[in-house]
Image (spheres, rainbow, N blue to C red):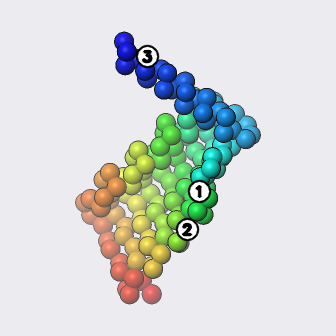
Amino acid sequence: MRKLLLATLLVVLGLQTQAQDCVSGDCINGFGTEKSTEFSYTGNFSEGLKHGNGKRVWDSGSTYDGDWKFDKQHGNGKIVWADGGSYEGGWKYNQRHGNGKYVWADGASYEGDYKFGEKHGKGKQIWADEAS
């Protein structure tokens, strides 16, 4: 019972915190824009969590555009880092998972399978000196 009460309290506090960051739309159960000191997010929300499709833009210049599930990058999406590197493909709980393509800023790339953030299974690596 204590665990259930604690979990409920954390969810309620999380909803209140996220609602305070909502600058437009419906950031509880709809489409809205949320801003924090580190990023902005525009997209779908469910129960105050990023859920569905949306785009996060960090103050550093990095972006993620894709699917979300309960506040995590989950499904298909593309992240582009401020240095020019990118990853496009499958995500599971904020980690590369499934098939995807990672491109480093120097032009090197890996396209293939990932499992919980790590290369796993079949794939093709192209080094920077081969990419030009």
The residue labelled by disc 3 is 5
- Circles 1 and 2, Cβ within 8 Å, touching? The answer is yes
Residue 96 horizontal/vertical position (percent): 39, 55
The mark that comes first in sequence, 2 or 3, is 3
Q: Is residue 23 left or right of residue 73?
A: right
Work out which residue is located at the far top of the displayed protein and give it: 1
In the image, what residue occupies the spot 36% across and 70% down?
110
Residue type, label 1: Trp
| Residue 111 found in image quarter | bottom left
| Residue 34 found in image quarter | top right
What separation in Å lies between label 1 and label 3 (alpha carbons)? 33 Å
Residue type, label 2: Ala
In the image, what residue occupies the spot 49% across and 70% down?
85
- Circle 2 sits in a helix, a strand or a loop, which is it? loop
Residue 58, numbered label: 1
- Assess disc 3: are there few (<14), some (14-19) or many (≥20) residues with their C-alpha within 10 Å of its C-alpha: few
Residue type, label 3: Leu
What separation in Å lies between label 2 and label 3 (alpha carbons)? 41 Å
| Whether residue 46 is situated above or below residue 132 in the rendered picture | above
- Nearest to the observer: residue 71 or residue 69: 71
Which mark's residue is nearer the viewer, 2 or 3? 3
User: Where the N terminus falls, by quadrant?
Assistant: top left
